[in-house]
Amino acid sequence: MRDEDTVIRAEHEFKKFIWRSTIEVGEALERSATWIIGGVAAIVAVVVSNLDSVAKISSLDGIKASVVLFTLSLLFGALSKQVGMAVVAGVNTLKETEALLNSEAGRRLMDQMTMEPRQLAQELATEAKAEYAINATAAAILLLVKEAG
């Protein structure tokens, strides 16, 4: 059941609390990803710096496989870190926006709006997609110029 276009009730506040609490786990995951990345990087450094000793107790294929797995672990850790940072930033933005809209200045701002909030959200989403496309195009052009030069 969608809650759009309804008066805010206690159930809505409860849903908001539950969803935000669930999403805010991303901050803890982001912090733990930092420690995991650091730990894996330290293991890789120890293995690489003691390659002669490791080669005596493990096969070359085993060493190659472990380095590949450690590298994949670092890549997934970095991805997890990025997602965690995005979630934390999104939750913080949501809280700041809600605080603004619940203030006196925010209520005045909402009263002065000339379009519906849903239409504003759609325009923001469209502009964000356009901005992403512009940034991606600019990055591609810069890459082509760099390769040509």
Image: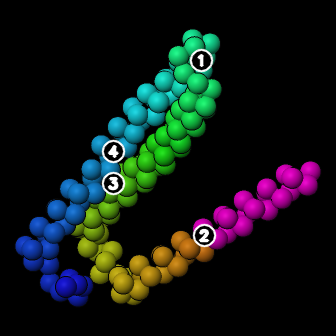
Query: Disc 4 residue type?
Result: Leu
Name the residue carrying label 4: 29
Q: Name the residue that disc number 1 marks.
A: 55
Q: CA distance from mark 2 to mark 3?
A: 22 Å
The span from disc 4 to disc 1 (Cα, nearest Å) is 35 Å
Q: Nearer the viewer, residue 138 or 37?
A: 37
Whether 21 is drawn above or below 122: the answer is above
> What residue is pinned by disc 3?
92
Q: Amino acid at mark 2?
A: Glu
Taking depth in this image into account, of 104 and 46 the one nearest to the observer is 46
* Residue 11, visible in the rendered structure: yes
| Mark 2–mark 4 CB contact (< 8 Å) | no
Q: CA distance from mark 2 to mark 4?
A: 29 Å
Mark 1 or mark 3, which is nearer to you? Answer: 1
Q: Earlier in the sequence, mark 4 or mark 1?
A: 4
Q: Which kind of residue does numbered mark 1 sit on?
A: Ala
Badge 2 or badge 3: first in the primary sequence: 3
Magenta residues (range): 132-149
First along the sequence among labels 3 and 4: 4
- 77 sits to left or right of 91: right
Please tell me which of labels 1 and 3 falls first in the chain: 1
Residue at horizontal 48 percent and vertical 76 percent from the top: 125
In this rendering, does residue 103 appear at all?
Answer: no
Q: Which residue is mark 2?
A: 131
Q: Secondary structure at mark 4?
A: helix
Expressed as whole percent of the image width and height from the top left, the position of residue 40 reads 47, 30
Label 3 secondary element: helix
